Image: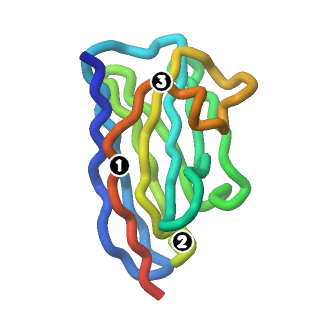
Amino acid sequence: QVQLVESGGGLVQAGGSLRLSCAVSGRTFSTGSMAWFRQAPGKEREFVTVIAWRSGSTYYADSVKGRFTISRDNAKNTVSLQMSSLKPDDTAVYYCAARDLGLVNGLKVPGNYHYWGQGTQVTVSS
């Protein structure tokens, strides 16, 4: 059974930092990719960033570029999201997701990811 488990969410003041982690168990996605999405109350799930397992190539949403950094640890089968210069608009539930495709078309579409974590709350106070 494939499981993705996020951790590291919490409450932080604007301008602060948080680090999220996503631990994958049950299989590996060596030829695929891992992504982070977020969903704020009343809004649709939004793409944040993605990383290819094999190459480490990354892609970011414009709203987080330069502030967030995604990384992966192949040996531990984990993906992390380092978030800096946080803003109140970053407040959301953050989800990690996995699929068996790399950084190709459709990487920003939630429906193209087949495995999801349960989410972790990030709240940024002003």
- Whichever of labels 3 and 1 marks the residue nearer the N terminus, that label is 3
The residue wearing badge 1 is 119
3D distance between C-alphas at marks 2 and 3: 31 Å
Q: Residue at x 39, y 72 (%)?
A: 123
Q: Residue furthest bottom?
A: 126
- Neighbourhood count class around disc 2 (C-alpha, 10 Å): few under 14, some 14–19, many 20 upward: some
Q: Quadrant of residue 115?
A: top left
Q: Nearer the viewer, residue 35 or 85?
A: 35
Q: Residue at x 47, y 13 (%)?
A: 30
The residue wearing badge 2 is 85
- Neighbourhood count class around disc 1 (C-alpha, 10 Å): few under 14, some 14–19, many 20 upward: many
Amino acid under disc 3: His
3D distance between C-alphas at marks 1 and 2: 21 Å
Q: Residue at x 30, y 67 (%)?
A: 10
Amino acid under disc 2: Ser
Q: Quadrant of residue 9?
A: bottom left
Relative vertical location of residue 7 with respect to residue 88 in this rendering, above or below? above
Residue 29 image position (x, y, % from top left): 44, 16
**Tag 3 secondary structure:** loop
Amino acid under disc 1: Gly
Left or right: where 107 falls relative to 76: right
Callouts 2 and 3 close, C-beta under 8 Å: no
Callouts 3 and 1 close, C-beta under 8 Å: no
Left or right: where 124 falls relative to 33: left
**Tag 1 secondary structure:** loop
Q: Quadrant of residue 2?
A: top left
Residue 82 image position (x, y, % from top left): 45, 53
Q: Residue furthest front?
A: 42
Residue 42 image position (x, y, % from top left): 53, 66
Left or right: where 52 falls relative to 20: right
